[in-house]
Image (cartoon, helix red, strand yellow):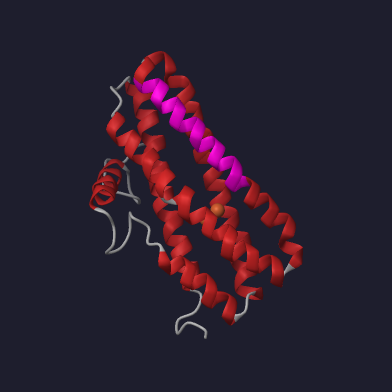
Amino acid sequence: MAAANPMQAIRIIREEHQSLAAVLHGLLYLVREIRKHQLRPDFELLGAMVYYIDTFPERLHHPKEDAWLFRLLRLRHPPAHTLLDRLESEHRSGAARLKQMEQALVRFQQGGRGEFAVFAASVEAFVLAERNHMRSEETEVLPLAQKYLTASDWAEIDAAFLDNNDPLLGHAAREDFRALFRRIVNLAPPPIGVGPAHA
Ligand SMILES: [Fe+2]
Ligand SMILES: [Fe+2]
């Protein structure tokens, strides 16, 4: 049976992208501040951001897209194969980039300033790739999904996406992630957060 309110997954995917985008923005912001002002890095915050990406987008968000949204769109609209092949391969390369970023963070924390450049480059590469990836999903995949998926496809996809709440969002948000999100919001300039605006 179709859900009473179909295509909820579209809203959830956009919200999950926004919360990942906020964390990516926060990471990039911290890296630039460290570079510009030679600040002592806040390793606890950097670690919490990387941990969030590993815990939610990496383990739940992208795999759900592969297993539900992309799989059903392949069935209903075969010309989307090339696009979906690319996005699935970005899920794999994103996982590899995340591992590199995690390792670079550990080396930076343990090895000191000399390891910063590699960590900064790994953050910049990861952020760029994830932003482009999310943009393709929102501007290319979601419109095709709205056009070609059936009501029963949406019932399956909605159920899958409603099942795992982003720990940064909603009532089920974990306290440690809530604290992380408050810190990110305080760091980020408008419109993401309430921190000071930067030129
Ligand atoms: Fe994705
Ligand atoms: Fe996504």
Return the residue nearer the eye: 199 or 82.
82
Residue 160 lies in the magenta-colored region: no
Query: Going by the image, does 43 lie left or right of 61?
Result: left
Return the residue nearer the eye: 192 or 6.
6
**Tag count:** 0
Taking the spot 61% from the left edge, 68% from the top edge, the residue there is 143
Query: Going by the image, does 157 lie left or right of 189?
Result: right
Query: Going by the image, does 70 lie left or right of 22?
Result: right
Name the image quarter holding residue 115.
Answer: top left
Is residue 9 depicted above or below 168 in this figure? Answer: below
What are the residue bounds of the magenta stretch?
90-109
Taking the spot 62% from the left edge, 62% from the top edge, the residue there is 70
**Residue at the right extreme of this rendering:** 79
Residue 104 lies in the magenta-colored region: yes
Q: Examine the residues drawn in magenta and state their main secondary structure.
A: helix
Is residue 124 depicted above or below 71 in this figure? Answer: above
Return the residue nearer the eye: 108 or 137.
108
Taking the spot 49% from the left edge, 72% from the top edge, the residue there is 158
Return the residue nearer the eye: 183 or 44.
44
**Residue at the top extreme of this rendering:** 114
Tell me residue 14's x, y (percent): 46, 61
Q: Quadrant of the C terminus?
A: top left
Is residue 56 depicted above or below 45 in this figure? Answer: below
